[in-house]
Amino acid sequence: MSVDHYENFPVASVLCPPALRPAVTAIYWFARTADDLADEGDASAATRLRDLDAFHADLLAVAAGSVPSPRWAALFERLRPVLQQFKLPLNLLTDLLSAFRQDVVKNRYADRAELLDYCRRSANPIGRLLLHLYGVGSGEALRQSDAICTALQLANFWQDLSVDRPRGRHYVPQADARRHGLVVDAPELEQSTRTGPAANALLADLIHWARELMQGGAPLVHTLPGRAGWELRLVVQGGLRILEKTDALGAAALTQRPRVGALDAPLLLWRALWMRAPRPRPVNETP
């Protein structure tokens, strides 16, 4: 299992309510196509940005009731009724496109605040769009959804260190690396620190950050109705399992990519089953 390419989407799965499957699928393909424009193939940065601009223009055209360009006509004609029926917040879709543009031009992050701003646009809109489809919009639910989505994004970053670094993409905040005496884009990082205490400590720190976010958002599984809550339980447990496997590798995650596969399914199901709702705090109990 991977959390890249929006695979945490419950795309037409058994647990996704049938009435919502067309909407979830339309949003998925919107995000997946735009992500591929930013990442896949060997197009130049200038070409990628032009394509994303054209994709953005088609989104605005469809949202305004106009006809999209022929290039992605099928995709946007599928998205059009979803925009109309569910009144999707357009800013969430444009935030995704903003993050994809950033992927083209930015490959380093100074600190956690900078990385969290990226996650706010690249990951959090996914959860908010799904909550919108389910009719869930409380402030607490949105906060928990953001925590889960950001944690999934971070888990993907730490899972993909061995893939992203050779491509020149460095999602480890530079401030975190410096705190452990390391430089994130040093070409000798793998050779000099693969089994060193500094790299191990850095990875443990980053994994702890993501795990705390995931656990902070996990109570949302008890808010979502029916099958949606069970879908989210598996998403949360899948993300935690990826973090667990990355943690077990330590600094070796710089050269090996941990995976969660079919053999992990019984464990994920068991852990999902035993996710307990938080105990209500008595009104006279101090935090």
Image: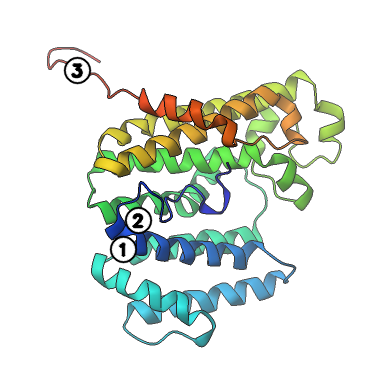
Q: How many marks?
A: 3
What is the C-alpha distance between the residues marked 1 and 2?
A: 8 Å
Label 1 or label 2, whichever comes before in sequence order: 1
For mark 2, what is the residue?
129
Disc ID at residue 281: 3
Specify the quadrant that holds the N terminus: top right
For mark 1, what is the residue?
89
Residue in the image at 75% along x and 35% along y = 256
Residue in the image at 74% along x and 22% along y = 198
Label 2 or label 3, whichever comes before in sequence order: 2
Disc ID at residue 252: none
Q: Secondary structure at mark 2?
A: helix
Decide which of 85, 122 is in the foreground and name it: 85
Circle 2 residues within 10 Å: few <14, some 14–19, many ≥20: many
What is the C-alpha distance between the residues marked 2 and 3?
A: 30 Å
Circle 3 residues within 10 Å: few <14, some 14–19, many ≥20: few
Decide which of 61, 202 is in the foreground and name it: 61
In this rendering, the label closer to the viewer, 1 or 2: 2
Residue in the image at 59% along x and 76% along y = 51
